Image (cartoon, rainbow, N blue to C red):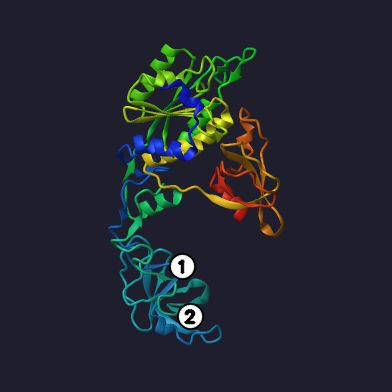
Amino acid sequence: MRSALFRKLVSVDDAKRILAENYTPKPVGTETISLSESYDRTLANNMVSLHDIPPFNRSTVDGYAVRAEDTFGAEEDHPVSLRLVGRVSVGEAPRVEVQRGTLAEIVTGAPIPEGADAVVMIEYTAREGNSILIRQAVSTRENVMKAGSDIRKGETVLKKGTVLSTYEIGVLAAIGSAKVEVFKRPRVALFSTGAEIVEPGKSLAPRKIFDINAHALSAAVVACGGESLNMGIVQDEANQLKVALQKALKTADIVTTSGGVSVGPTDIIPKVLDTLGKPGVLVYGIAVRPGKPTTMAVVDNKPVFSLPGHPASALLIFHVFVRPVLLSMGGRKEKPVIVKAVVSERLFPSRGRRTYVTVTLKKGRAGRLLASSTPSGLSGAITTLAKADGFTVIHESQQFVEKGAVVEVELFKPSTYYSFMG
C-alpha cells in the first residue's frame, strides 16, 4: 500500500466500483431449519403449496347449512320453515346430506355437507321443534369459504429472498411446511481499536470512554440478517492487530473494524491489512463526509471494512457501504426506503466531498414532510444518529441545497415511513 494513497481520496462511486471489481458478494450457503426457528430468516427457494387452502368448503359462521334456493323469499315477518336433519362439527366428515326442504346445523370452520351451497347465520333463525325458521334469505356461496379460495394447489405463496415475518410464517404453517430452507446468516467479525475505550460495564477511568461502536455495529449486523461476532477491543499495536485480523478472517465471512484508520501514529490498520493477503487494501480514504478515513480491503476473497472511530461516522458509513454487501451475502433483496421532504434550512456540503446530512422529519402544512439537519460537527456523538430519521445526500458537485428545496431522504428504519405516512 502506498502511504500517499490516503491523500488522494477516491470518490464514493469509485470506492464502490473498486470494491465491486475485486469482490462480488454472494450468499454464503443455505440450511434447513424448523418453522419455529424461522423468524427473520430469508427464504432460499420459492415456496409452493401442495394443497388447496382451505382443503374443503367450510362455513365462516355459526348457523345452518342450506340450499340457497330454499331460502328465497324468506323475511322477518314471513319466515321459511326447513326441517333439521343433523349437525356438522369441525374436524369431522359430515354424516348428513342436505336435500330440498332440509338443513343442517353447522359451526364456524366445519365442512359444508353434501347438497348445501350456503349458510344462514344463526342470528336470522328460530327453532320450532324439529324445524328451523329462516328469516333472511341467502345467496349461493354466502358465508362459505370455498376450497382453494385462499391458496390454490401449485401456487407460489412466497418467493425466494423473502424475509420471514409473523405473517409469512403463518402462510408457511397454512400450507403444512414444518421445515424451511433459508440462507445462512453471514458471519461478521468486528472489533474496536483505541487506548481510550473500555468495555461497557467496566470501571471508567479518567479520560476513557465506553466502547460504543462494537455494540452499535453488532446490532446493525443483526438488523441486516447477519450474525455478529464481537471480538471486543484490540489495542493499536501491530502484532495485536495482526493476530486479531487473522482470527477474524478465519472465523467470519466479512470483517468490520472501527478506529485506527486516520493518519495518526497509532492508526495502523491499513498497513497491517496489506500484509495479510491479496489484493489487500483497495481504498484508503474516501471523499465523503462523514467518514473520510474509511478503508476497504479484500483479503483472500473476504471483504474488510475499517470504519472511523467516531460512532456516528462509523454507523453512517456502515449503512452506505457495508449494509448492501451484507444484505447480498444473506440473500436479502431489501431496498432502501426513500421519502421526499422539504428542507427547512440551507444545507452546505463539505467542499469536494459527497456529504451525508442526517435529518429529522416532521409533518408540516398540508401534510408535507419537513427535514431539519441534526447538529453538524458532532461525528463523535452517538445521539446525532439516535435522533435522526434518515439522511439526505449532497453531491460533491453541488454548492448548497437551498432552503425550501425538495430532497430525497433515505430512512434508517422502514417503520419510520408508516409513522409519517399513516
Question: Mark number for residue 62?
Answer: 1
Q: Is residue 262 left or right of residue 253?
A: right
Q: Residue 326's x, y, as percent?
A: 41, 37
Drawn side of residue 214 relative to residue 141, left or right: right
Whether residue 319 is visible to the viewer of this picture, yes or no, is: yes
Secondary structure found at label 2? strand
- Amino acid at dot 1: Asp
Eyeballing the image, is 326 above or below 245? below
Report helix, strand or loop for mark 1. loop
Which residue lies at the image location 32% right of the left edge and 30% below the top edge? 301
Residue closer to the observer: 288 or 28: 288
Q: Nearer the viewer, mark 1 or mark 2?
A: 1
User: Badge 1: few (under 14), some or many (20 or more) residues near its Cα, within 10 Å?
Assistant: some
| Residue 412 spot, x, y in % from top left | 55, 42
Residue at image location 40% in from the left, 16% down from the top = 242
Mark 2 nearby-residue class (10 Å; few <14, some 14–19, many ≥20): many
Question: Where's residue 141, x and y in %?
Answer: 40, 75
Q: Which of 271/374 is in front?
A: 271
